[in-house]
Amino acid sequence: MVLWLCWQTSWALAQAPLAATSPTYSVPELVRTVLAFNPALNQAQLGQAQAQAALQTAQALPNPRLEWSGGRAQAPLSSAQGAVSSWGASQLLENPQVREARSAIAREGVAYQKVQVLQTQRDVIAHVRQLAYEVVLRQEEVQAASEGLILLEQTQDRVRLRVNSGEAPRYEIIKADAEAIHARQRQQTAQLALEQTRIRLNQLAAGQLPAGWRLRASLEDALPILDRDTLRREVRSENAELKALRTEVERQRARVREAQASRWPGVEIRYAQTREPEVRQGMVGASIQMPLLDQRQGPLAEARAELLRAQARLESRESELTLQLDAAWAALEMARLRVDSLGSGAIREAEAALRVSEAAYRFGERGILDVLDAQRVLRSVRADLLLARYQLQAAAIEIDVLTGRELAQP
């Protein structure tokens, strides 16, 4: 107990300067910080700007065309000699259906990129939340490993005293030393896993998180009350991936309309004027492309095939996401049951078994192996409880992603 209090005091003193200088984030604050620097989100936003430029290009009117030519007229048998010039202007009047279909394709492209930005944002938020709770899990594992090491060192000291006094055989201190070595290795492994998770989280922020940042969260954070039927409806109506697929279907429909209307691209109006030494001519004309040899059947068939493929992907993905929601719901319920069972029954029984074995060892009724086994069981139950709490949070985050809910900490 003295060693435990000393370790707690030294740890608190070592952490005091760090806590005073290092920023502390809640999960929503951490999400906002990562979103400000995330490279994937920045690229998605650039894609949206590109789609806006494509819409401006699709809505642009065709430019008029001007022509000019000049020379001299020389006729040996005529007196009509001198400068000759001609100029002309033409303007394409597009088929309104072609223009509207092209603009619709670009508008659907803008809508698609907006949904892509939203989906990327939600994916980043979900990843940040998942890694944040993994950081909490690793911190709890480090703390549990440190507490287990302190407990084993206390047991090791008691065993050494009994061995030196001749009350216990030599193999007990050998076993206690081996368990202490394993406990130090577990602590080092847990600390390494914590640092790796923090690095992965900082990568999402492009390395912009300050050094020594800390997280203010708990694996026991409350979760919202969910209804399975409501979640199914939200998956079909609010899921970002399904919204993107519906936008793609509409874009392919616009391509079909464009292919149908492109058989008559438009009418070109022309005016030309020619000046000769004795004659001045002015002509007005119009030209239209006749769909006699090429009726655009190939592009129309391609557009229809792409439309069918987009519709098939949408229907298939709706079914897959519904099944994925069912799996996430099952994982949520399973994790909740494990948390309830481990937190209310198993961990209390393991703690009671450890107290009984320690008391029996002090009175010489049991050996050190029984105490070490009880400690091992308690460590295993605590680790399972921490993992179950993390899995509960992870399942709730996955449900948020599938249903398109606002991915902020409850």
Image (tube, grey):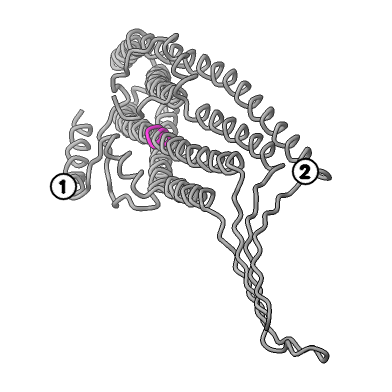
Residue 38 visible in the current orientation: yes
Lateral position of residue 67 relative to residue 141, left or right: right
Residue type beneath disc 1: Ala
Point out residue 92 in the picture as x, y percentages from the top left corner: 61, 54
Seen from the viewer's position, the closer of residues 3 and 251 is 251
Secondary structure under badge 2?
loop
Magenta highlight range: 126-131
- Residue 347 image position (x, y, % from top left): 35, 14
Decide which of 364, 165 is in the foreground and name it. 364
Tell me how far mark 1 sits from mark 2, CA to CA.
Answer: 78 Å
Q: Which residue is mark 2?
A: 291
Element under label 1?
A: helix
**236 shown above or below 20:** above
- Residue at 22% over, 37% down: 7
Q: Where residue 226 sits: x, y (%)?
A: 37, 13
Q: Give the number of the disc on residue 20.
A: 1
Chain-order first, disc 1 or disc 2 = 1
Say left or right for 244 vs 231. Answer: right
Left or right of 74, for residue 318? left
- Label 1: few (<14), some (14–19) or many (≥20) C-alpha neighbours in 10 Å: few
Viewport quadrant of the C terminus: top left
Residue 243 belongs to magenta span? no
- Amino acid carrying label 2: it is Pro
Residue 105 vertical position relative to residue 163 in the rendered view, above or below: below
